């Protein structure tokens, strides 16, 4: 698949920190998942996270959102220490959105009912709520699907629904956990275009983790590779693929982007 990114954000925008993980360590039953990990994510950047199973990618998302507390270390959003701030406040005050790998919607509600459910939580003004939902419906071309129960949507439609639900709160940062998993090529391309548009049109910082390395590298500005609880490589897609540590720990010697 050809690269769909027409630019790399670092080429036209000065970097400005929006999210920082400071010396994050995480243990599960005495097993160390993350080891004093440092990570800075910049405003309006699309960052990709790669690494083998169990390396801690989803754990990083859970720590950022507040679903899990780190064993050690701190989480900063816009320079504010959010380590002890609860999930709801991170989502509202600090405009943090999260799209999980599985679920994220109510199966027996229709597509529009799922949108309304989230909108009623975040937007108190009825007129603003209606306007926001109408914008989402237009943006994601949901008109033919509004009355279909979520459980009857295709895999790609479900993923679009969960992303759109996360956008109702107008997040500044959007975390996407395995968005390309078990999807066909055309649906993956559609989601890649959505991700790039979130950056270029909506000015959202996007963080993506996925095992589909080529698909991820096709739509990010920068990628990191995790191994043994640490970041072992960081750079543009071209740089990361050529990195000897990344090739040894994750890509292998034969991997190519195209």
Image (tube, grey):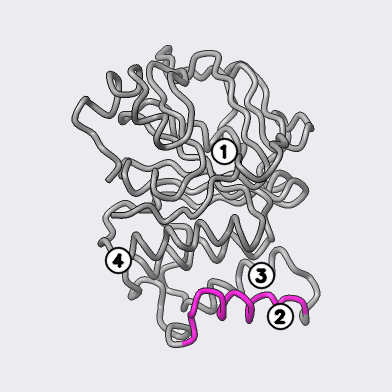
Residue placed furthest toward the left: 254
Comparing labels 2 and 1, the label whose residue is closer to the camera:
2
Label 2, label 4: how far apart the Cα atoms are = 30 Å
Q: Nearer the viewer, residue 29 or 172?
A: 172
Which-is-in-front pick, marks 4 and 1? 4
Q: What residue does disc 2 label?
A: 131
Displayed quadrant of residue 155: bottom left
Give x and y (percent) for residue 239: 42, 30
- Kindly identify the residue that appears in the image at 28 percent across and 54 percent down: 1
Q: Which mark is residue 153?
A: none
Sequence-earlier tag: 2 or 4? 2
Instruction: From the image, tell me which residue sits under label 3.
Output: 119
From the top left corner, tell me how far across and down residue 238 is, in percent. Answer: 39, 35
**Disc 4 vs disc 3: which is toward the camera?**
4
What whole-number distance in Å separates the C-alpha atoms at marks 2 and 3?
A: 10 Å
Residue under numbered circle 4 = 186
Task: Indicate whether 114 appears above or below 55.
Answer: below
Image depth: mark 2 or mark 3 in front: 2
- Mark sitting on residue 67: 1
From the top left corner, tell me how far across and down residue 8 is, in percent.
54, 45
The answer to which quarter of the image holds residue 248 is top left
Circles 1 and 3: CB distance less than 8 Å?
A: no
Name the residue located 55 percent from the left edge and 62 percent from the top edge. Answer: 197
Give the mark toward the camera: 2 or 4.
4
**Number of numbered discs overlaid on the protein picture:** 4
2 or 1: tag closer to the N-terminus: 1
Alpha carbon separation for disc pair 2 and 1: 30 Å
């Amino acid at each position: 698949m050809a690269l769909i990114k027409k630019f790399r954000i670092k080429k036209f925008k000065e970097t400005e920190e929006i999210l920082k993980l400071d010396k994050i360590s995480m243990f599960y039953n005495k097993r160390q998942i993350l080891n004093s990990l440092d990570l800075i994510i910049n405003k309006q950047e699309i960052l990709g996270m790669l690494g083998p199973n169990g390396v801690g990618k989803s754990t990083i998302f859970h720590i950022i959102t507040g679903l899990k507390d780190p064993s050690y270390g701190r989480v900063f959003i816009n320079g504010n220490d959010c380590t002890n701030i609860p999930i709801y406040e991170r989502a509202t005050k600090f405009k943090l959105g999260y799209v999980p790998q599985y679920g994220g919607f109510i199966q027996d509600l229709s597509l529009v009912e799922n949108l309304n459910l989230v909108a009623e939580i975040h937007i108190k003004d009825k007129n603003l709520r209606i306007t926001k939902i109408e914008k989402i419906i237009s943006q994601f071309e949901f008109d033919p699907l509004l009355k279909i129960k979520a459980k009857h949507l295709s895999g790609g439609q479900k993923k679009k629904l969960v992303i759109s639900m996360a956008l109702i709160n107008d997040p500044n940062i959007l975390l996407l956990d395995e968005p390309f998993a078990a999807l066909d090529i055309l649906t993956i391309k559609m989601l890649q275009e959505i991700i790039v548009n979130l950056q270029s049109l909506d000015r959202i910082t996007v963080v993506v983790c996925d095992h589909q390395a080529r698909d991820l590298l096709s739509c990010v500005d920068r990628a990191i590779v995790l191994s043994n609880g640490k970041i072992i490589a960081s750079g543009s897609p071209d740089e990361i693929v050529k990195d000897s540590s990344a090739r040894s720990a994750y890509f292998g010697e034969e991997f190519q982007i195209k």
